[in-house]
Amino acid sequence: MTYHPKSDFMRVMMERGYLADCTDYQALDDKLSHGVVTAYIGYDATAQSLHVGHLLNIMMLRWLQKTGHRPITLMGGGTTKVGDPSFRSDERPLLGPEQIDANIAGMKQVFAKYLSYGDAPTMPSSSEAVGPDNVALMLNNAEWLDDLNYLDFLRDIGRHFSVNRMLSFESVKSRLDREQSLSFLEFNYMILQAYDFLELNRRYGCLLQMGGSDQWGNIVNGIDLTRRVLDHEIYGLTSPLLTTSDGKKMGKSQGGAMWLNADMLSPYEFWQFWRNTTDADVGRFLKLYTELPLEECARLGALAGSEINEAKIVLANEVTTLCHGSEAAAAAEATAREVFEKGGVGDDLPTLELTSEEVGDGISVIQLIVRSGLVKSGKEAKRLIAENGARLDDAPLTDAGLMLDRGALASPIKLSAGKKRHALIKLSD
């Protein structure tokens, strides 16, 4: 890509590695150069927290606001009732309205840390870039989707969609090629998402939809529909679907999803996830997930040997500060140094508190390993012990039948899975 952008936002997108594709680089860049552009990303409410896989697009919205433009976070209160079939092998489980509302409430906690909304304090590191024209909006597509009249919608919107074209989209084709069922409900999803873009353009003058590259077909649908119905020119921009250098999907770990809400994943575990970044990914992740200058990202990413570990700590601190605050980042680093460098326990480790009743006459170490979140099942816990990967207070744990009574838990104990994952177990009474 040899295009040289004029606008700050497009320059940041290209220089830092956020940009995969754009429907019209030059026209969008011109719009960004000559006034405030409103852009949105949609988030279906399928869980009570966003995870690290969403962080790339959240950072894109943050940079959009920092460079003077207006971000919209669109909550999928309506579309979640259908479920995005893109590149899935099966249908999403359908959620009820109460669960969807609870999920949206949980997701809102994250956005307030990265974007400045009208009723919230400005972003600490970029308040100077937020004015009345680019305060972020949080909207819910249930506002216009819930009350649609089906016949009117079919006549006014459905007639603009070619089934032949919809079947040609990779996200649909891959499902059909594997002869996996695609319900009519799911097939409607792309029409509803296209309608979102039309409504956001009509109501808020939104000119740009952003998303991961797997959303390209849905984004193009919205652009085409808006052009047909309103005769307005709007744009799409996608980010790469990120994998780590070893090919794993970003945001997944042995323990499951890396959630952004502190009540679902402790700030220490979040910090540790970034500290464990592979050497080859450090420079790239610094560009994408922090706001450090590009020269500093390049310098840190080029460090070799043991020095790269300090770069990983910088990465972990910067990302954790954005998501959980500077105090949480400092506490996580202090705990990590205490645990790894001094062999101590650390104050910020994930902690399982047990009542005396729960312990009773004794509780198995297998149960403690599972309940502390170090593994997902008793079978995994037994395998961990058999393969010499479990430790109790830094000593090898070899007895899978070990029972611990209240005396053994009178002071906190530390359980470890491998060298990097630890948890404290203590009595709460």
Image: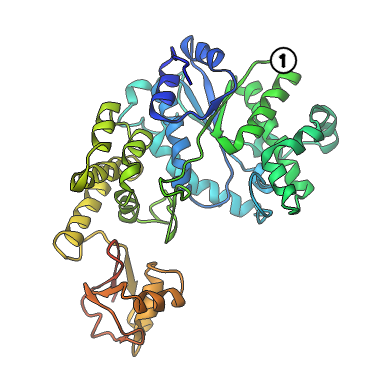
Q: Is residue 119 visible?
A: no
The correct choice, above or below, for 271 with respect to 281 in the image is below
Q: Name the colour scheme.
A: rainbow
Q: Which of 121 and 358 is in front in this view?
A: 358
Q: Nearer the viewer, residue 325 or 9?
A: 9
Q: Which residue is drawn at 21% across and 72% down?
A: 394
Q: Which residue is drawn at 19% across and 48% down?
A: 306
Q: Is residue 62 left or right of residue 423?
A: right
Q: Where is residue 385 in the image (x, y as percent from the top left)?
A: 34, 77
Q: Position of residue 368 (x, y in %)?
A: 36, 76
Q: Where is residue 390 in the image (x, y as percent from the top left)?
A: 31, 73
The residue type indicated by label 1 comes to: Asp
The correct choice, above or below, for 28 with respect to 43 in the image is above
Q: Position of residue 279 (x, y in %)?
A: 30, 46
Q: In this view, does 420 lie to the left or right of 30?
A: left
Q: Which residue is drawn at 80% across and 27% down?
A: 160
Count of numbered tags: 1
Q: Residues within 10 Å of mark 1 (few under 14, many from 20)?
A: few
Q: Quadrant of residue 79?
A: top right
Circle 1 SS class: loop
Most extreme residue toward the bottom, as rendered?
361
Q: Can residue 160 be seen in this view?
A: yes
Q: Nearer the viewer, residue 39 or 338?
A: 338
Which quadrant, please, contains the C terminus?
bottom left
Most extreme residue toward the left, as rendered?
342
Which residue position is annotated with label 1?
A: 231
Q: Quadrant of residue 282?
A: top left
Q: In this view, does 192 lie to the left or right of 54?
A: right
The correct choice, above or below, for 345 with respect to 277 in the image is below
